[in-house]
């Protein structure tokens, strides 16, 4: 969180600089609206009726809204904003940088700061902002900042508005809904090519989520947040999407593959990454490329090992293999849950990440339930 404080401190220094400039250019005037003494909060009692009316409407509005002072401190927030940003238990004022860390860099704050003090821009500004928090999906939204109270009129020059209103527009949590639709249709197409069933890929998503939820509560995996869990649930089923380019006779060949066929088969990993590269999270390509890598470096396509293999791919390889073992294939009969645990345990540290195998064992009953609930009919 140190960076967050750095951003805040730098932003404050910049604010002071601009204010110093302002003081040099402007003579002071009477404030038309008072701040409540000391707290920096907007005193509703001091506001004219028309402002109170606006705040009253915003209180019950579904549109997230905030009121900012001219230093970009949030001095008031409506319930929609609180709910969206999980800000239920905190005291205002807080600087906006905190809610939009690390997106609101000193540079971006500087641009906003200057724009809302600029007559040419009408003391307003619009910016696409992003907000990340470990307990919820990423938020992307347009933030529109407009003056809330009038400008103070000074004897010589116009001053700037004392308070601003910030409204959030076009909010998309994760902003991926549309893209997900496109990728799902690709997935449908790839399923037609493979002898894997639709339920296999759903189950792989569900098992992967079980492991990810377990990691969420483990401080050794700080990268596993709510966004990670949602992403792996959605993306794990895509692991073999590259098979869309693999010839049918190779995919469905009953016997062993010859060298050339095997080489072509392995290409589904890299082809999958090409297909998924438009997805706005690197997890998508990591899953496609690395889901056949092994912990000891004997996997493909690159033979990388250990934690060089991205975490999502290490998770999915356990999920994928567990399901493949349970399923009936043309070349094998289905294995029992216990037999699948045995095989995966034996391959801990060779094929699979041993820490993740322990988590798999700890959660094995959930795997069994998922297999039974989403069984192929
Ligand atoms: Fe694969
Ligand atoms: Fe699979």
Image (spheres, helix red, strand yellow):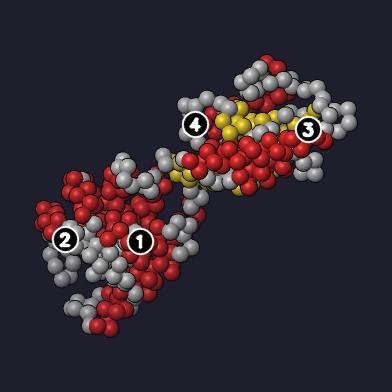
Mark 4–mark 3 distance (CA, rounded to whole Å) = 34 Å
Between marks 1 and 2 in the image, the one whose residue lies nearer the viewer: 2
Q: Name the spot of residue 279 as percent of width and height, x first.
A: 46, 60
The image quadrant that residue 294 belongs to is bottom left
Q: Earlier in the sequence, mark 4 or mark 3?
A: 3
Q: Is residue 186 left or right of residue 22?
A: left
- Residue 341 percent across, percent down from the top left: 14, 54
Query: Is tag 1's residue or tag 3's residue first in the polypeptide sequence?
Result: 3
Q: Is residue 336 left or right of residue 66?
A: left
Image coords of residue 26 (percent x, y): 82, 32
Q: CA distance from mark 2 to mark 4?
A: 45 Å
Residue annotated with mark 1: 287
Q: Which residue carries the number 4 mark?
A: 87
**Nearer mark to the viewer, of 2 and 3:** 3
Q: Give me the disc on residue 347.
A: 2
Instruction: Kindly report the distance in space between the C-alpha atoms of the residues bearing marks 1 and 3.
Output: 56 Å
Q: Earlier in the sequence, mark 2 or mark 3?
A: 3
User: Contact (CB < 8 A) between labels 4 and 3?
Assistant: no
């Amino acid at each position: 969180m140190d960076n967050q404080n750095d951003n805040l401190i730098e932003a404050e220094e910049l604010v002071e600089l601009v204010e110093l400039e302002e003081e040099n250019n402007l003579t002071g005037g009477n404030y038309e609206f008072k701040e409540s003494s000391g707290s920096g909060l907007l005193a509703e009692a001091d506001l004219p009726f028309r402002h109170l009316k606006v705040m009253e409407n915003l209180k019950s509005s579904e549109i997230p809204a905030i009121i900012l002072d001219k230093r970009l401190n949030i001095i008031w927030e409506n319930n929609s904003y609180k709910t969206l940003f999980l800000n239920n238990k905190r005291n205002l004022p807080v600087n906006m940088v905190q809610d939009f860390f690390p997106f609101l860099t000193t540079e971006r704050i500087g641009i906003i700061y200057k724009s809302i003090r600029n007559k040419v821009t009408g003391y307003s500004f619009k910016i696409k902002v992003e907000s990340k928090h470990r307990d919820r999906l990423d938020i992307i939204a347009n933030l529109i900042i407009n003056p809330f109270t009038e400008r103070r009129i000074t004897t010589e020059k116009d001053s700037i508005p004392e308070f601003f209103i910030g409204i959030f527009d076009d909010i998309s949590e994760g902003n991926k809904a549309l893209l997900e639709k496109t990728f799902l249709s690709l997935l449908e197409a790839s399923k037609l090519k493979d002898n894997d069933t639709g339920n296999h890929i759903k189950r792989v998503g569900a098992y992967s989520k079980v492991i990810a939820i377990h990691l969420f509560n483990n401080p050794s995996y700080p990268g596993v947040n709510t966004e990670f869990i949602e992403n792996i649930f959605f993306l794990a089923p895509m692991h073999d999407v590259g098979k869309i380019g693999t010839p049918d006779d190779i995919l469905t060949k009953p016997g062993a593959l010859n060298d050339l066929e095997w080489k072509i088969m392995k290409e589904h990993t890299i082809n999958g990454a090409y297909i998924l590269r438009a997805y706005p999270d690197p997890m998508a390509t990591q899953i496609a490329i690395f889901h056949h890598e092994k912990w000891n470096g004997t996997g493909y396509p690159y033979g990388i090992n250990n934690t060089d293999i991205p975490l999502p791919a290490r998770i999915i390889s356990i999920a994928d293999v567990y399901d493949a073992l349970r399923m009936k294939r043309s070349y094998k009969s289905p294995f029992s849950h216990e037999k699948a645990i045995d095989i995966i345990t034996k391959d801990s540290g060779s094929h699979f990440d041993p820490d993740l195998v322990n988590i798999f064992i700890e959660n094995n009953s959930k795997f069994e339930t998922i297999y039974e609930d989403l069984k192929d009919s």
